[in-house]
Image (tube, rainbow, N blue to C red):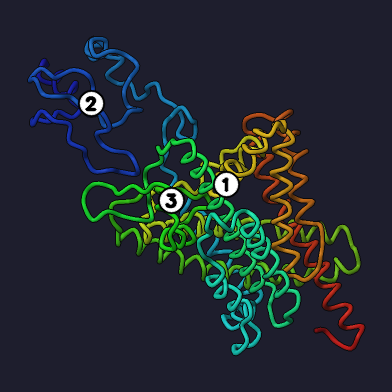
Amino acid sequence: IGDIMEETGALIRKRRATISTGKCVPLKQVNGRSEVDESVNGRSDSGNIVTKRNVSDLPSTTSKERKKRINVPSDRQSCHRLQESLLSSASGYRNYRGVLNWCVVMLVSFLLQRHTEYGILVDPIQVVSLFIKDPYNMPAACLVIGLLSLQGCFSERVGLLVHSINLSVTLCFPVTIVLMVKSITPVGGASALGVYTVLFLKLYSYKDVNKWCREMSHAKARSLARSLSCKSSVSTVLYVSYPGNVTLRDLYYFVFAPTLCYELNFPRSPRIRMSFLLRRLFEMLFFTQLLVGLTQQWMIPIIQSSMKPLEDMDLPMMMERLLRLAVPNHLLWLIFFYWFFHSSLNFIAELLQFGDREFYRDWWNSETITYFWQNWNIPVHKWCLRHFYKPLLKSGVSKWLGQSAVFLASAFFHEYLVSVPLKMLRPWAFMGMMAQLPLAWFVARFLRGNYGNAAVWLSLIIGQPIAVLMYVHDYYVLHYREGSAGGGPE
């Protein structure tokens, strides 16, 4: 009987594994959980370290109490223990790979349904036509290529005036070309304006940082050290101080680096990881094709079917089209976020050995609108904080006015990137950004926790399709309804 009791006790204690080597050896992961996650403080009778299979399997009682309970007949037959449900945050469970696979399966099923309803609508030639109308006439590409010829180092003799003129030209020159040249498509124009906007923000940061360095050097505080654009061939890092950083090599490294904030010495990664680089490149190519396919197969039919309700101002049908457009628009936005902020920026950073890879934070857990805007686009947030918001506070502006000014500048650039390529001045993007101010106040004041997070998601899912339909309606009226009245669409 004693032998049977010992064997039964060993079976009950099967969660505990004794490793004869005396070390905690990690075992193979099963369903996202390691068989040996952490060791239990203490040793077995033989002196070996005793480990457990799962953190959640550890009872709340001590080892002495467990030994006593083994000899109780009712406890030997127990199949329950103190534990949390997997979907509870207290459980510590983090493996949701099956949910991701479920999303992929549902997406494929929906695309198959769209295929049976509309057929195959994906057309690569149509995608190319969004960027260029004539293969021998590509003004948008010429705008981007000509961008490189505008760059150079600004000497201290020229001063702030010439730099201000250069920044103004950087913003106004592409606008003039886009509005005057009829062969520029909206997508091509938006891409070119986006490149010029990024360059404008970079050059502004470049001017500010060198100005700060110049002021520090005048005060004999030459404490800046670390340069990223210049690497050392030895194990030690070569640091650059002002004015040694004012070189074309340093400027062009900053122009191509995945950041908007200039530094004399960027953190550098030790080497280029080819496996990481190839994974990001594969993701870029794959998600580009996925974005194009979903847009043509899912978005465009809904937008085309919305033309008649928009023209007739049929509010019920417009609401129905809005809800139908919300899901594919939001899915495309999420895919674009991953493609740009994770795949593309990490690819560029790995190629240039740029060390700071914090391009986004956990914006999906945002419980306020402000937290979302601070964490979903870290490069822009850092630029606004460093070169716009903090200087306003130093000049005596209140925090509320400073935040309003940041939203105002963001609204201007949103409208700049939408209205100019479409060649029609409409306030929808501007108003959508400015509407974030009262919405942010309302969510922060009246909603908390999951309710606040739900409000953030709702603003993302519903707000963007409203702007899309407004621009589609105005673009349709301007280019098609008026064109048909004049003898045919343009």
Q: Amino acid at mark 3?
A: Pro
Which element carries disc 2, helix, strand or loop? strand
Does 279 appear above or below 142? above
- Residue 196 position, x and y percent, is 61, 64
Left or right of residue 69: residue 475: right
Disc 1 marks which amino acid? Trp
Furthest residue toward front: 157
Mark 3 near mark 2, Cβ–Cβ under 8 Å? no
User: Which of the marked residues, 1 or 3, is nearer the chain's N terminus?
Assistant: 3
The residue under label 3 is 243
- Decide: few, some or many residues near mark 3? Use Cα within 10 Å; few <14, some 14-19, many ≥20: few
Sequence-first disc among 3 and 2: 2
Which numbered disc, 3 or 2, marks the residue closer to the eye?
3
Residue drawn where x is 50% and y is 60% of the image:
339
In the rendered image of this protein, does residue 467 appear above or below residue 61? below
Disc 1: which residue: 383
Image coordinates of residue 172 in percent, x first then y, are 70, 66
Picture residue at 60% right of the left edge, 38% below the top: 366
The image quadrant of residue 364 is top right
Residue plotted at (46% across, 30% down): 85
Residue 231 versus residue 52 in the image, above or below: below
Q: Amino acid at mark 2?
A: Ser
Pinpoint residue 418: horizontal percent, then vertical percent: 72, 63
The percent position of residue 55, horizontal first and vertical second, equals 33, 28
> Could you tell whether 457 is left or right of 441 in the image?
left
Q: Is residue 147 above or below residue 249?
A: below
Neighbourhood count class around disc 1 (C-alpha, 10 Å): few under 14, some 14–19, many 20 upward = some
Regarding mark 3 in the picture, which secondary structure is present there? loop
User: Residues under labels 1 and 3: Cα distance?
Assistant: 22 Å
Observer able to see residue 366: yes
Q: Quickly name the residue at label 2.
A: 39
